Amino acid sequence: MTSIDFKSTQRPSYSMAQSKLIQATLDSLMEEGVDGCSVRKICEIADMSVGLINYHFGTLNNLLAAAYLDLAFSLMDEAIVKSQYTILPRQRLSIFIEETFSDSVMQRKILRAWVVFWGMIDISPKIKDAHDSSNKAFRVFLEQSFFELDQLYPVKPSPRLAAIGLTAIIDGLWLEWCLSSETFSADEAVLLCEQWVNTAWK
């Protein structure tokens, strides 16, 4: 497996007007969930005319896909960048895990947006593509991290499967916390992930 540049993901770049519409879409979904999936509400928040969604994105579906990618990469990019502050593979992974459960990520309102996106994956190829590309970027980072650990001591059963496993644990813990935040804290979620990594690595 070859090394990758963790400082840049596949996050698209947008014009100022496009970014404004994307942020308005996320704000609308986080505030009202599926009820926020409305051209009128999105444009009210963005203070832009309805026609500009078609002009900049073609369809509401395309705007939602862009919002999916923007949310996924915004939650991921900061963690990846901060993890580069160290050259030690195990410490880098720890920083990434800690940032994954930081205050900016552990927000229940984000779940409202994800529920809308997840519900559209099976009916919207654009949303599915957004899901697949962002999840791939997440797994690639973790697989590369486990690959570097594997050079020091074998990772069980393999860096690829370890990355898939940790991804599932992180996603599951985040979802469970959003549904019932009284069950465990963010610090405990980090501890569970760290224990899992140690089990896989040693």
Image (cartoon, rainbow, N blue to C red):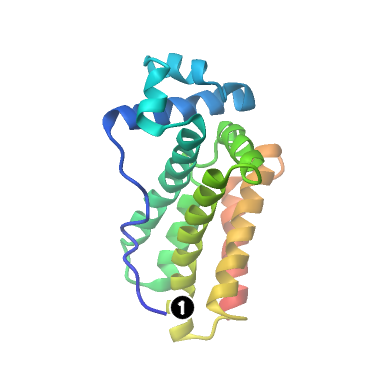
- Residue at coordinates 50% horizontally, 15% vertically from top-left? 40
Whether residue 141 sits left or right of residue 189 in the image: it is: left
Against 177, is 190 above or below?
A: below
Q: Position of residue 31 (x, y in %)?
A: 56, 23
SS type, badge 1: helix
Against 70, is 52 above or below?
A: above
Query: 85 or 32: nearer the eye?
Result: 32
Q: How many marks?
A: 1
Q: Position of residue 9 (x, y in %)?
A: 36, 56
Against 38, is 119 above or below?
A: below
Quarter of the image that includes the N terminus: bottom left
Q: Amino acid at mark 1?
A: Phe
Query: 103 or 142: nearer the eye?
Result: 142
Quarter of the image that includes the C terminus: bottom right
Whether residue 45 sits left or right of residue 113 in the image: it is: left
Q: Quadrant of residue 162?
A: bottom right
Q: Identify the residue under disc 1.
A: 147
- Residue at coordinates 59% horizontally, 39% vertically from top-left? 117
Q: Quadrant of residue 108?
A: top right
- Residue at coordinates 45% horizontally, 59% vertically from top-left? 137
Residue 195 visible to an observer of this rendering: no
Query: 99 or 6: nearer the eye?
Result: 6
Q: Position of residue 142 (x, y in %)?
A: 48, 66
- Residue at coordinates 50% horizontally, 57% vertically from top-left? 97
Task: Determine the residue located farthest toward the left in the rendered image.
Answer: 16
Residue 177 visible to an observer of this rendering: yes
Other-residue count near label 1 (Cα within 10 Å), few / some / many at <14 / 14–19 / ≥20: many
